[in-house]
Image: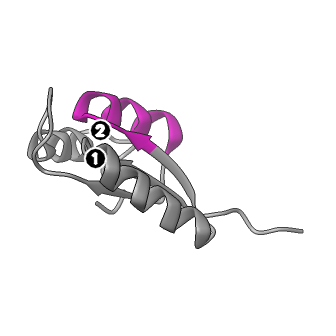
Amino acid sequence: MSEKKQTILLIEDEEMLANMYETKFKASGYDIHKAMDGESGLKLAEQTNPDIILLDVIMPKLDGFSVLKQLRENAKTKNTPV
């Protein structure tokens, strides 16, 4: 019986960085979900219930501080490490 892979949600608007992190984490055996802005990152956090969230601070639509605030206010994501 195989163990469930750990899931990382990467919220990063810089495509080159996001792709670099995705490649590295996948090679290390993680499942990766990517969002390119804060709004889509919040939606993905709710939908995918990741084990950890890597969050950029300066992003379009919704900055990282606002995303973190909303993650902490949501019962489903309030305890997810960021």
- The mark found on residue 4 in the picture is none
Q: Residue at x 42, y 52 (%)?
A: 19
Horizontal side, residue 79 vs residue 25: left or right: left
Query: Circle 1 — which element?
Result: loop
Front-lying residue, 53 or 21: 21
Q: Is residue 39 left or right of residue 66?
A: right
The image position of residue 10, as x and y in percent, is 37, 51
Residue 3 figure quarter: bottom right
Q: Give how far across and how far down residue 65 sits, in percent.
A: 10, 47
Three-letter residue code for mark 2 = Asn
Q: From this viewpoint, is residue 74 visible?
A: yes
Which residue is located at x 22 percent, y 47 percent?
A: 72
Q: Quadrant of the N terminus?
A: bottom right
Magenta region: 34-49
Can residue 79 be seen by looking at this rendering? no
* Residue closest to the far right: 1
Q: Residues within 10 Å of mark 2 (few under 14, many from 20)?
A: few
Amino acid at circle 1:
Glu
| Relative depth, front residue between 45 and 26 | 26
Q: Is residue 12 magenta?
A: no
Which quadrant of the structure image shows residue 62?
top left
Please name the residue shown 33% across and 50% down the image.
Answer: 16
Q: Nearer the viewer, residue 33 or 6?
A: 33
Q: Which residue is mark 2?
A: 74
Is 3 located above or below residue 17 in the figure?
below
Residue 74, above or below 9: above
Front: mark 2 or 1 = 1
Q: Is residue 41 above or below residue 56?
A: above
Specify whether 48 is left or right of 40.
Answer: right
